[in-house]
Amino acid sequence: METTINERVSKILDEHKDYFSSGKTKDIDFRLKQLKVLKGAIKDNEKLILEALDKDLYKSEYEAYASEVGFTLDSIGYVMKNLKSWAKVKKVKTPFFHVGAKSYIYSEPYGTVLIIAPFNYPFQLLIEPLVGAMAAGNSAVLKPSEYTPNVSKVISKIITENFPKEYIRVMEGGREVTSSLINKPFDYIFFTGSVRVGKIVMEAASKNLVPVTLELGGKSPTIVDKEANIAVAAQRIVWGKFLNAGQTCVAPDYILAHRDIKEKLIEEMKNSLNKFYGDDVLRSRDYGRIVNENHLNRLLELIDREKIVAGGNFDIDQLYIEPTILDKVSWDDKVMEDEIFGPILPVIEYESLDNMIKMINSRPKPLSLYVFSENKDIWERIIHSVSFGGGCINDTISHIVSPYLPFGGVGSSGIGTYHGKSSFETFSHRKSIMKKTTKVNLDLIYPPYKEKKVKLIKKILK
Ligand code: NAD
């Protein structure tokens, strides 16, 4: 069985490498044409994609369109508009001692890239990196998550119907398929998923020295200072946390609330929950479901029922967990061990900003961090003293929706960035070239190195 998959994957990779070697994908007009095809195909299949997202994650039409379909359409448009300028050979300065030389940076595609996606935004997290890979002139193999089979099927249909299979191909399947793929000599691996699997991917890639981007997760803190606008903070936290039933990599994982405003914040968050989802959240069409029973059971284990101040209900058959807020949580509670990745929001009270920063810094570097405060000094203090992927002041999640901001983690929350121009850069190798004339030929660099030359070089390089 294993050999069969391995043989199949090797054959596929060879086909892709042959296709790439033909040079077709490097042509800018080809890239633009294919991006247009992709955009058209997504539009043509919009209904199917939205239906699949409904089946796999019970995403509402608004959420599915905004965070998956619309997001990628907009991104393709942005990339197409800018691609010609990004792909241009860039002339850069040359140090004066290279007399008669000119320097350039060529952006060249890596070749055949492997893109692996998780289940939570199963369409966007596969297609958004693909847009970058295509823009940069690569061929690609896509591995969707096996937890969202309906979305996986639609993506496979879209790609198969619109692109030569040696150019872009979808490999559906479970862990055995991913394991085989990551052990092959692709030219680049772009992985989005958990820290645990990220390590497996990087280890496998290291055997062939394949460069990687790892878009991982972690616990993203949300700090609510005593000078925050509490009503707005509550609304924006509840929105960012319970979107997609909390299964968002950049969702606020936990709240650090200043002692003076904690009670008010919790009250306001309850109001926001009620405003967003009504009295019976189970019946709200705007609230999603947990991807499967394993994840649901894992999440239920994290709820300390004595600490519930909102929510707490669940329905295993419907893969439903009510938006749940836990109060009086301490750093040692089970819910604080790993990324929650579900609709459970623990609140930890703090008094001293310095101690709180120390606690965050004693843990793995977060993917995101959010600060709610009207005090600009607090913003800057936190931005400068905590290392994290990216974040927002007075909002959650929005930083990832801008093509002008590179998105990615740091430390255990990931390696590398993408979105907008950064996607193009991620999938391009920057090839540095110095073009020299033969008309000038400085004797200084050649042996024999007499004392005069030593003196001269010391004057130049200091
Ligand atoms: P996951 O790591 O379990 O799975 C991701 C992919 O890896 C899937 O395609 C799966 O098939 C594959 N995989 C799983 N186990 C494997 C193994 N042993 N060997 C090889 N491949 C394997 O992640 P998930 O549960 O689908 O998604 C949730 C995680 O993803 C969370 O940690 C979340 O924070 C993270 N995430 C990060 C981002 C980001 O952009 N940084 C975005 C979304 C999700």
Image (spheres, grey):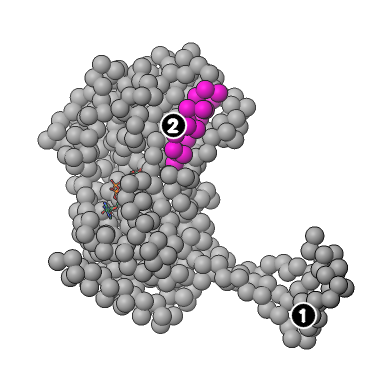
Asked whether, in this view, residue 198 is left or right of residue 83, the answer is left
Q: How far from the left and from the top, in percent, is residue 139?
A: 38, 71
| Mark 2 residue element | strand
Q: How far from the left and from the top, in percent, is residue 381?
A: 60, 30
Q: How far apart are marks 2 and 1 (CA)?
A: 59 Å
Looking at the rendered structure, which numbered label has been put on residue 10? none
Q: Between residues 300 and 132, which one lies in front from this camera angle?
A: 300
Under mark 2, the amino acid is Pro
Under mark 1, the amino acid is Pro
Q: Between residues 454 and 63, which one lies in front from this camera angle?
A: 454
In front of the other: label 2 or label 1?
A: 1
Circle 1: is it few (<14), some (14-19), or many (20+) Cα within 10 Å? few
The residue wearing badge 2 is: 221
The residue wearing badge 1 is: 447
Residue drawn at (17%, 36%), measured in percent from left and top? 319
Q: What stretch is highlighted in magenta?
A: 354-373
Residue 428, placed above or below residue 294: below
Farthest residue, direction right: 452
Quadrant location of the C terminus in the rendered image: bottom right
Which of the 4 image quarters holds residue 153?
A: bottom left
Asked whether, in this view, residue 367 is left or right of residue 277, the answer is right
Tell me if residue 216 can be seen.
yes
Tell me if residue 228 can be seen.
no
Residue drawn at (16%, 39%), measured in percent from left and top? 293
- Count of residue discs: 2
Asked whether, in this view, residue 405 is left or right of residue 326, the answer is right
Q: Does the magenta stretch include residue 370?
A: yes
Q: How far from the left and from the top, in percent, is residue 372?
A: 50, 27
Q: Between residues 228 and 297, which one lies in front from this camera angle?
A: 297
| Mark 1 residue element | loop
Circle 2: is it few (<14), some (14-19), or many (20+) Cα within 10 Å? many
Badge 2 or badge 1: first in the primary sequence: 2
